[in-house]
Image: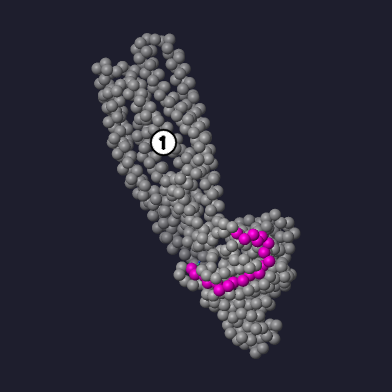
Amino acid sequence: MSALKWFWGFLKKYRLLLCVGLLMTTAISVLSIVNPYVSGMIVDDVIAGGQLSLLPKLIITLILVTLVRGLLRFFYQVVFETCSQGVLFDMRDQVFRKLLSEDYSFYGKKKTGDLMSRQTGDMEAIRHFVALIIYCVYENVLLFIFALVMIFTVNTKLALVMLLVLPFTALTTWRQSKSVGPTFARIRDRFSSLNAFVQENVSGNRVVKAFAKEDYEIEKFNKENDAYRDAQLASSRVWMKYLPIFEVLSYLLNVVLMLYGGYMVIRGEITLGNLVTVNGYLWMLTVPLRMAGWWVNDIHRFLTSVEKIYATYIEEPKVKTPCTPVEHKRMEGNVEFKHVTYTADDEQILKDISFTAKKGQTIGILGSTGSGKSTVMNLLCRFMDTASGEVLVDGVNVKDLDLYDLRDNIGMAMQDIFLFSDTIEGNIAYGRPNCSFEEIHDAAVMADANHFIQKLPDGYDTIVGERGVGLSGGQKQRISLARALLKKPSILILDDTTSAVDMETESYIQEQLKKLGGNCTVFVIAYRISSIKDADQILVMDDGRIIERGTHAELLSQNGYYASAFHHQYGEIPAPAACME
Ligand code: ATP
Ligand code: MG
């Protein structure tokens, strides 16, 4: 499907309304013929012919036609504006839904600012086209044709002379349209890039400040700004080059009419009234000629924007719910990885990962940074797919499950915490917006967040800034934990969730997590041995592999990576087990 066909899919819904609008536009164009014709009659029949009795009728006709045209113009503008807002509403909605269905790899490649400009600047170009350009072009084409027909009925010779200008206008319009197209594509690219840059600087403002890089960023911004301005100027230059030609061509018609029409009046080939009538039709010829370039611009802008939005829209997520998913709404929480490998950009991130987690068990995952711990959990949530091997939940491959069901059963406190600019209550209740306040409160108590939330000026109603600005790292972690706990999931994933809380808080949270009993399989990713020492099974990862596995005591006796991490964290105590067990 082409971008235009896709766009037509949205416009189609409003085709009846559009037809009504176009009918009104046609009526206006037809009515435009009347006034010049009546003016000619006033000159010939009333002024020159002395038929004064005709004057009141003619004047009433002039007034009535003007009033009806005004009314119609008001209504058809409302019609086209309604259509444009409708098209935009549907398109924004569909594009947003698609954006939400895109997977990790899509967001890994795209810049936020770029995606934002699809939903703002590009959508506006489409609105402008539907609300204005469709009827403008249609009305002016009609006006042009009607005016020509009327001039032909007045005098064929005069009409033919005036037609001589047409081929030059058509040629100029064609040449301008060829030059202006690429400049619009460039403007849209530069705009997206500028948007992306500003977005990154606003989001990363704290880093910019911390490194005192304001001057550096301003310099980079100026380059983006320059590039955008240059793209706009390049487009204006095309316009500036062709505008005078369109102006000259349209004024040429005035000159032709005055010289040749005047000459015909003197020779008695046409009446003065005929000249007044043709003069009245002249604007119907010159306006379309003068505006042709503008419309070519706007149509190009519209085409570029539709193509850009469509190109983003058609990117299909690789991770999708299968056509006939296995029905499994409430999961038990048995997890199994069978010889799983994961590859990204030709690099093998995970190699032959196999483990089993039974319902209700706690699995600790420890390992050096970049060893693949978060990737294992991302595969469990099916944020991406394995290159080989299987990830099974309750014996069913996650690829065969409905994505919504799978993720609905998993509560995840992510390593990269994201809080919405909403109240604390809203953030905790994100996964279950209809739950009672008691449940939110209980989840906050379990995550040891209730304590500090109550001390905030507005308690649970405190609005946290974008991404949780205004809260400390540990506070954000606890809100994120409460959010995951509130879901009452079958599988709970805590990725580095207690790294920023003190030991006392951590042990309190561990005690609380024990209350989950056997209903929830918990994965705890941590660097601190204290976070995972009580787990039923501990997996130690390095360079994408599981290098050790077992309980705390078993791993200590293996004297490998885990034991060495233990000694680093607790000192070279001869009998570490005595301290920890
Ligand atoms: P940390 O303890 O620092 O959180 P981790 O063990 O969670 O590390 P992962 O986030 O799983 O590590 O990343 C494992 C490796 O995979 C890293 O080397 C990372 O650079 C790489 N990686 C992760 N995601 C991608 C991706 N989308 N494309 C390419 N490489 C990736
Ligand atoms: Mg990680």
Q: How is the image coloured?
A: one colour
Left-right relation of 521 to 240: right
Residue 145: where, in percent of width, then height? 37, 29
Q: Is residue 373 visible to the viewer in this orientation of the structure?
A: no
Secondary-structure class at tag 1: helix
Q: Which residue lies under the disc numbered 1?
A: 137
Q: How many numbered marks, from 0 up?
A: 1
- Is disc 1's CB within 8 Å of ligand 1? no
Identified at 41% across, 36% down, the residue is: 137
Residue type, mark 1 in image = Val
Q: Nearer the viewer, residue 164 or 352?
A: 352
Rendered image quadrant of residue 501: bottom right
Task: Please state if 524 lies on the left or on the right of 118 as rendered.
Answer: right
The answer to whether residue 168 of the structure is visible from this angle is yes
In which image quadrant can residue 434 be found?
A: bottom right
- Residue at 45% of width from left, 35% of height from top? 135
Q: Residue furthest bottom?
A: 574
Residue 175 versus residue 27 in the image, above or below? below
Q: Is residue 477 shown in magenta?
A: no
The answer to whether residue 393 is left or right of residue 238 is right
Q: Residues within 10 Å of mark 1 (few under 14, many from 20)?
A: some
Q: Which residues are magenta?
A: 325-344
Q: Position of residue 580 (x, y in %)?
A: 68, 82
**Residue 341 picture location, percent across and down:** 53, 72
Q: How far across and down, in percent of the image, does residue 223 sit?
A: 40, 58
Q: Residue at image x 48%, y 59%?
A: 110
Q: Residue at x 39, y 29 (%)?
A: 143
Q: Up-down: is 96 above or below 493?
A: above
Res. 522 image quadrant: bottom right
The C terminus, quarter of image:
bottom right
Judge whether residue 328 is colored magenta.
yes
